[in-house]
Amino acid sequence: MLAIASTVISFVAVGFSIFVFVDARTRHKRDMFLKIHEIMMSEPSYRGRQLLLSQRFDERSMEDLDPSMRADVSRTLALFDTMGLYLYRGYLLEEDVLSMWGTRVGRLWNAAQPFIERRARQSGETTAYPHFQYLVERARRAGPTPELKRLS
């Protein structure tokens, strides 16, 4: 009887340890997302997003941009690329990322195409910001509002 009780207690302890590990991992992913989200909401990133969405760009208009404005756009694109990388590697919860940024990433990706193409040409890469592209693909697959799907 004592052996059975100690075995049951051991299984309960292992189960509890697994639960604590999974919970801590989820909390860590949410904390990491919160940090990234705070950076995404910073003033330079906000300016970069607004600039991308406020006008259409071509090669000439990109050249005419003030260097600080071009830097804001580049910073914004790099932040979305980083968020996409973290999502791809499983460092973030997809549901959290897409519920906060999913409806915006497609519009920003489309608006940023002249900058993305220019970056690819300048760097000689076939694809600039590949993880941003991954983020956009995940958002498009999930649909316009992933959190509303869950509620219905």
Image (spheres, rainbow, N blue to C red):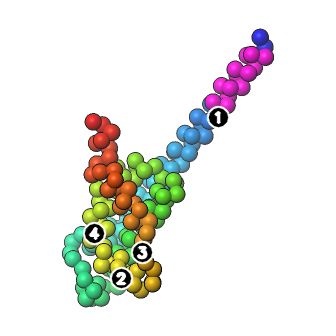
Give the quarter of the figure containing the N terminus: top right
Residue at point 44%, 61% (across, down): 83
- Please tell me how crowded label 2 is: few (under 14), some (14-19), or many (20+) other residues with Cα within 10 Å: some
- Location of mark 4 (residue): 110
In terms of image quadrants, where is residue 19? top right
Q: Earlier in the sequence, mark 4 or mark 1?
A: 1
Relative to 123, is 55 on the left or the right? left
Percent across and percent down for residue 10 are 72, 26
Dot label at residue 135: none
| Up/down of 122 relative to 94, above or below | below
Q: Earlier in the sequence, mark 2 or mark 4?
A: 4
Tell me the magenta residue range: 3-15
Q: Earlier in the sequence, mark 3 or mark 2?
A: 2
- Location of mark 2 (residue): 118
Q: Earlier in the sequence, mark 4 or mark 3?
A: 4
Give the quarter of the figure containing the C terminus: top left
Which-is-in-front pick, marks 4 and 1? Answer: 4
Residue at point 70%, 20% (across, down): 8
- Location of mark 3 (residue): 127
Give the CA distance from mark 2 to mark 4: 14 Å
- Location of mark 1 (residue): 17
Percent across and percent down for residue 75 are 40, 73
Looking at the rendered structure, the kind of residue marked 3 is: Thr
In terms of image quadrants, where is residue 118? bottom left
Residue at point 30%, 37% (across, down): 151
- Please tell me how crowded label 3 is: few (under 14), some (14-19), or many (20+) other residues with Cα within 10 Å: some
Relative to 84, is 108 on the left or the right? left
Looking at the rendered structure, the kind of residue marked 2 is: Arg
- Please tell me how crowded label 4 is: few (under 14), some (14-19), or many (20+) other residues with Cα within 10 Å: few
Contact (Cβ within 8 Å) of mark 4 with mark 1: no
Which-is-in-front pick, marks 4 and 3? Answer: 3
